């Protein structure tokens, strides 16, 4: 008598390991929870995809299919629950569901219309007049772009940029050759890059949490004083943000989403190339690169993927980074201007540090710098701290949401989504905190996507907590009030001071 297959019912010989008719396994072993491949012997990792067979912690691979839902259903009334309670008549139930569907559709239309109007006005309207004055940095990059149009390749540094990289100037040269070089057109490049960043931020947050959280995160970024300031200036910051968010989206897709290995390698290579590309826009990309490497270390320590498979994936990512960034590192090694600029950014070159007496005083200066940098994500800064004049990079409500999201992130740091965001945020804040406060906002902006993703999650978490405790109309009203407060504070604050109350905090040495 042979072995009967539990899948198709056919009989197979006693020594068979798999059914000869349907290939279903006939012996013991484990099926991989990620790719469903059968592993015939007890082992720790899948033979097919390298995922852990012993660690049953919830990961993004388990969460994505269940947690991504449409925006319309995010505000839905539970019509099924209402119809089943108290013996509601069928006609009443149908009418109620039709009313709920109409309400959801109206909310979607209103939200899309409002968000579209905000994006069009804040990113594309009045670029030639707001800000009214062209900063020295904008003028310098425009000058280099015109020179590139005439002469071609100029290298990765230029004397007029005072150590800043020319990567943005090459992109700007292509842009102006196609569309013109008046002030509004030159700034439009940053506006377009900012719009693309908003779309990618929506996709990134959808992978990590859900689409409602993604919508909140996108709205907060759309009206943020922080991102809005650089979206309306002809500076490399917006292109750096675009490269960063695209790299994070591809990296999270490759690390956590279920896909075939070929697509995974392609996404890893593209992500690595974007991380390397960011180095040509701003030296803040070095901090982001270190943060991403720490994220890889966290993935390794989590043990969810076998070291062999993870090593191949990391090599794919790293090779792309090295190939793209090699000219940058060569320029750093050979160009004294770039090295001097990088050195001048360090907190150890600040007057306060240089006038510190003793090791303990120097340590307090560095520690205080890091603390002030982290606090700037959720609180306004004061003139006594920065010696330059105060400033705010997020609104009060946005800062509160960032703080709530950060607290939840710390509490649930073992989960992939929260742990990854926490690692990125900590490394970026510490890295930027080791630089001078002048121009700190432009370097810390690499933390903006992570901070606003946390704020979007916090808003979504708050609404989920209120569901069942507050009437549905109350939740909709709360959403409207929160959105109105955020938009009013951020937009009125920005248009009162388009580049900040103290420009050196926002732009640093490029305006000196």
Image (spheres, grey):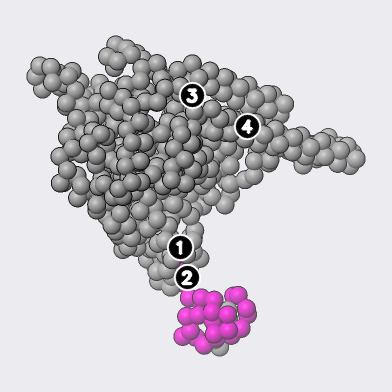
Q: Quadrant of the N terminus?
A: bottom right
Q: Residue furthest front?
A: 150
Let me know if residue 411 is in the magenta part: no
Residue 425 point in image, percent of width and height? 36, 35
Residue situated in front as seen by the camera: 5 or 389: 389
- Residue 137 left/right relative to 110: left
* Mark 3 or mark 2: whose residue is earlier in sequence: 2
Res. 263 mark: 1
Residue 135 point in image, percent of width and height? 37, 25
How much space separates mark 3 and mark 4, taking CA atoms?
Answer: 17 Å
Name the residue rendered at 47%, 40% in the picture: 180
Instruction: Identify the secondary structure beneath mark 2.
Output: strand
Per the image, the residue denoted by label 4 is: 117
Res. 38 mark: 2
Residue 86 point in image, percent of width and height? 83, 35
* Mark 1 or mark 2: whose residue is earlier in sequence: 2
Res. 130 mark: 3
Where is 455 relative to 488, above or below? below
Q: Nearer the viewer, mark 3 or mark 4?
A: 3
How much space separates mark 1 and mark 3, taking CA atoms?
Answer: 43 Å
Q: Quadrant of the C terminus?
A: top left
Q: Residue furthest left?
A: 358
Quarter where residue 119 is shown? top right
Let me know if residue 15 is in the magenta part: yes
* Mark 1 or mark 3: whose residue is earlier in sequence: 3
């Amino acid at each position: 008598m042979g072995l009967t297959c539990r899948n198709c019912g056919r009989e197979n010989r006693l020594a068979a390991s798999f059914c000869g008719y349907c290939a279903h396994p006939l012996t013991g072993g484990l099926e991989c929870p990620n790719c469903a491949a059968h592993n015939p012997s007890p082992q720790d990792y899948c033979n097919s995809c390298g995922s852990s067979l012993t660690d049953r912690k919830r990961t993004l691979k388990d969460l994505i299919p269940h947690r991504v839902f449409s925006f319309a259903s995010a505000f839905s009334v539970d019509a099924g629950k209402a119809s089943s309670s108290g013996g509601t008549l069928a006609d009443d139930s149908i009418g109620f569901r039709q009313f709920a569907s109409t309400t959801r559709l109206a909310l979607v239309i209103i939200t899309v219309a409002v968000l579209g109007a905000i994006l069009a006005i804040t990113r594309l309207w009045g670029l030639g007049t707001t800000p009214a004055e062209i900063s020295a940095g904008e003028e310098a990059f425009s000058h280099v772009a015109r020179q590139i149009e005439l002469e071609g390749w100029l290298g990765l540094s230029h004397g007029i940029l005072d150590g800043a990289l020319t990567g943005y100037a090459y992109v700007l040269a292509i842009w102006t050759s196609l569309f013109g070089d008046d002030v509004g057109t030159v700034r439009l490049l940053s506006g377009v890059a900012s719009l693309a960043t908003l779309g990618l931020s929506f996709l990134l947050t959808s992978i990590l949490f859900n689409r409602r959280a993604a919508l909140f995160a996108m709205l907060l970024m759309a009206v943020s004083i922080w991102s809005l300031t650089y979206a309306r200036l002809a500076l490399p910051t917006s292109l750096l943000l675009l490269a960063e968010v695209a790299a994070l989206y591809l990296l999270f897709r490759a690390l956590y989403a279920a896909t075939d290995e070929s697509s995974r390698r392609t996404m890893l290579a593209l992500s690595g190339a974007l991380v390397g590309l960011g180095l040509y826009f701003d030296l803040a990309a070095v901090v982001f690169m270190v943060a991403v490497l720490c994220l890889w270390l966290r993935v390794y320590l989590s043990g969810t993927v076998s070291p062999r498979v993870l090593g191949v994936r990391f090599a794919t990512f790293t090779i792309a980074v090295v190939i793209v960034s090699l000219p940058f590192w060569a320029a750093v090694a050979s160009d004294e201007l770039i090295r001097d600029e990088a050195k001048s950014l360090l907190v150890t070159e600040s007057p306060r540090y240089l006038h510190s007496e003793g090791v303990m005083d120097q340590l307090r200066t560095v520690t205080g710098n890091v603390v002030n940098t982290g606090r700037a994500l959720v609180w306004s800064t004061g003139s006594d701290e920065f010696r330059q004049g105060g400033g705010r990079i997020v609104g009060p409500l946005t800062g509160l949401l960032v703080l709530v999201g950060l607290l939840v992130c710390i509490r649930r740091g073992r989960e992939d989504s929260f742990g990854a965001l926490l690692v990125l945020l900590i490394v970026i804040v510490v890295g930027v905190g080791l630089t001078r406060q002048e121009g700190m906002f432009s370097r810390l902006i690499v933390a903006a996507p992570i901070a606003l993703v946390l704020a979007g999650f916090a808003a979504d978490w708050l609404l989920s907590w209120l569901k069942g405790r507050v009437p549905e109309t109350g939740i909709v009203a709360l959403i409207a009030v929160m959105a109105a407060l955020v938009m009013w504070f951020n937009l009125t604050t920005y248009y009162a001071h388009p580049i900040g109350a103290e420009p050196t905090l926002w732009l640093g040495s490029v305006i000196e």
